[in-house]
Image (cartoon, rainbow, N blue to C red):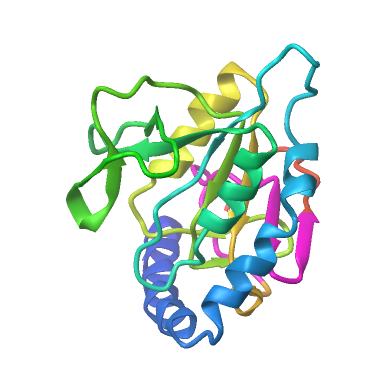
Amino acid sequence: MEMQDRITAEKARLRELLKGRRDEVPDAAARAAAVATYADDVLALGPALRADAPGPVVSFYMPIGSELDPRPLFRALAERGATGVLPVIEKRGEPLVFRAYRDGDELEEKRWGIREPLASQPVRDPDILLLPMLAFDDAGWRLGYGGGFYDRTLQALRAKKTVVAIGLAYDEQRLENVVHADYDEPLDCVLTPSGLKRFQRQGKAKA
């Protein structure tokens, strides 16, 4: 089996294991509330703000299943001036598009049960991205769901401007090492109920 095939197989094995682990995390609502207390720390990572400038554009996600709920954090960020966007899948194999969202806006349920803003909402590139995941490690590698959407999106955004990618997770989702390939994009930070951890990105190491 070639290296890429081994990486793909190991990721698939870990996804099954870690989804079950995440499903068993207790006190999910309390932990989401704990994450929201770090709103000021999240905003401090974004672009410098001027008194006459709007807040940063922050992408988040509508939680599915046992994903850590980012909505309490987003509401805290919005109270501090952040503008919200949600990801939209337009085509497989392409980067995500982000459309404006305010709390209470109408959403459409699309593939995989993902709720997305209406097509009439304007497209905006985020400055800060809050990402769901199944696992992370202390080097900033993230295990997602296998579609590669966020990896392609981060690659495209990072080619245009400075963005901050923050993985949201429970502390129980940490692994010693997340297997990764050369197309995977690392996180800048991970935020869990116990705090915010920043990573020093020095380029991507090839698997």
Q: Is residue 86 shown above or below 31? A: above
Between 42 and 82, the one nearer to me in the picture: 82
Residue at 59% over, 59% down: 168
Residue at 44% over, 49% down: 61
Residue 101 is inside the magenta segment: no
Q: Can see residue 108? A: yes
Q: Main secondary structure of the magenta part?
A: loop
Between 114 and 188, the one nearer to me in the picture: 114
Residue 78 placed where, x, y %?
Answer: 60, 39
Residue 16 placed where, x, y %?
Answer: 37, 78
Between 59 and 161, the one nearer to me in the picture: 59
Count of numbered circles on the image? 0
- Split into 4 quadrants, where in the image is the N terminus? bottom left
Residue at 62% over, 33% down: 82
Residue extent of the magenta highlight: 177-197
Going by the image, does 35 lie left or right of 91? Answer: right
Residue 190 is inside the magenta segment: yes
Going by the image, does 29 lie left or right of 105? Answer: right
Residue 84 placed where, x, y %?
Answer: 51, 35
Q: Specify the farthest residue to the top.
A: 52
Q: Can see residue 204? A: no
Going by the image, does 85 lie left or right of 139? Answer: left
Q: Is residue 91 shown above or below 141? A: above
Residue 30 placed where, x, y %?
Answer: 60, 76
